[in-house]
Image (cartoon, rainbow, N blue to C red):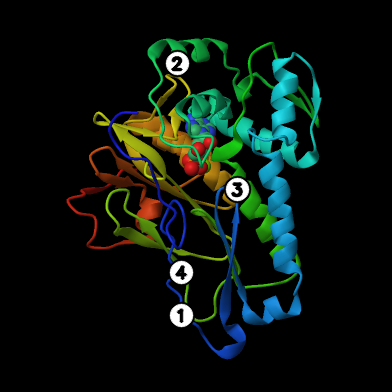
Amino acid sequence: MTGGTWRRRVSLLAAFALVVLLAACGRDDSRIIEHRLYAMATWIDVTLPVRAAREHPQLIAEIEAELRVFERDLYPWTDGELARLNAALSAGEAFEASPALAAVLVSAQRAAVASDGAFDPGVGGFVELYGFHDAAAAPATRPDDAAIAALLASSGSIRDLAISGRRITAPPRRFLLDLGGIAKGAAVDRIADRIEALGIAPALVNAGGNLRVIGAREDRAWRVGIRAPRGEALLGTIELGAGDATSTSGDYERFRDSDGERLHHIIDPRTGRPVAHTEAVTVIAADAETADAASTALFVAGPDAWLEVARRLGVTAALRVDASGRIEMTRAMRDRIQTGTSGDSAIIAVVD
Ligand code: AMP
Ligand code: MG
């Protein structure tokens, strides 16, 4: 293995965006407490009023149990449902998916269509080829051109799937669908829906930078910090209102720098290579699943297409940091973000 060191940063507070709850405690009955779990290869934080945690003593255990099912069934390199789907489709067989998996596939396919294939879970073969599928394995390697070309020729896209209710069929291709670009958002929505159904508020669920707010805080708005893609500073903080979700995709989460090239985990499905034109994208949306898919889609879509893809996905508040550290954002994001002094030499442009 040449040059560079494998670095997997799991910050104390979050994995992708450094999400800081800039919240102090209010009066006693509105005090909040953060519960931390490790699942889906990231830290998951569930922030609840102290009172709610007391009144629902089983809630955190139930959430953890649900996450265990999610990480087994939505992760392809295990013996869960997504692995079985990939095996069936690759063998030319139809597959009867659970309602939960079918729903995520429908959302993922919609994001793939809206982004002209910039977002496509069909990149799983490349994720594996680079070595990003196994968090414990290191370091990432640069595959040779022939291996990339062969995979480009054989890989099936999520756009190939015919989804009819729970029945999934596809033309004969090799399918290694990897839902890593959307599954954490889907999980956050499931947990947030459960909390909401119990009438608990305010609350916040954060899975590695995929975050949704339930209800408004009495004392102040929820504020989360967005980590600058280089260095340890914050790029800024955004204010989230009741029901808002946000997601950040960055090239600094799983990567290895090799001969001046950053090998990282977000792959352009059209080239089979890590995206080089973008360092980070942050979006705000009405649900965490949309936000998760959108941040990945916009990351891959790049300088010419990202605003159009955001529009098609219904995302108005979006921010992109390009490969030179320049920050551009939509007006809706400009209205929500407070940038600090930590942007180094970043130029901030409003682009719509
Ligand atoms: P995120 O951090 O949400 O942007 O998701 C990144 C993860 O999504 C990667 O670790 C892969 O598992 C997967 N992925 C990589 N490239 C793509 C892509 N172009 N479309 C969809 N998922 C992707
Ligand atoms: Mg994503």
Name the mark on residue 148. Answer: 2
Q: Visible in this render: residue 115?
A: no
Q: Is residue 283 left or right of residue 329?
A: right
In the rendered image, which residue does mark 1 sit on?
24
Foreground: disc 2 or disc 4: 2
Distance from Cα at disc 3 to Cα at disc 2: 27 Å
Marks 2/4: CA–CA distance: 41 Å
Disc 3 vs disc 2: Cβ atoms closer than 8 Å?
A: no
> Mark 1 against mark 2, which lies toward the viewer?
2
| Amino acid residing under circle 1 | Ala
**Point 52% across, 65% down: residue:** 241
Q: Position of residue 267 (x, y in %)?
A: 45, 29
Q: Nearer the viewer, residue 18 or 131?
A: 131
Image spot of residue 207 (x, y percent): 55, 55
Mark positioned earlier in the residue sequence (2 or 4):
4
N-terminal-most mark, 3 or 2: 3
Q: Nearer the viewer, residue 39 or 116?
A: 39
Residue 35 horizontal/vertical position (percent): 60, 69
Tell me where residue 98 sits by quadrant: top right
Q: Which residue is mark 4?
A: 21
> On the rendered image, what quadrant is the C terminus found in?
top left
Distance CA(mark 4)–CA(mark 1)? 8 Å
Identity of the amino acid at label 3? Met
Q: From the viewer's perspective, is 281 left or right of 228? A: right
Residue 122 sits in quarter: top right
Q: Residues at badges 2 and 4 in contact (C-beta under 8 Å)? A: no
Above or below, 162 relative to 284:
above
> Which residue bears the numbered disc 3?
40
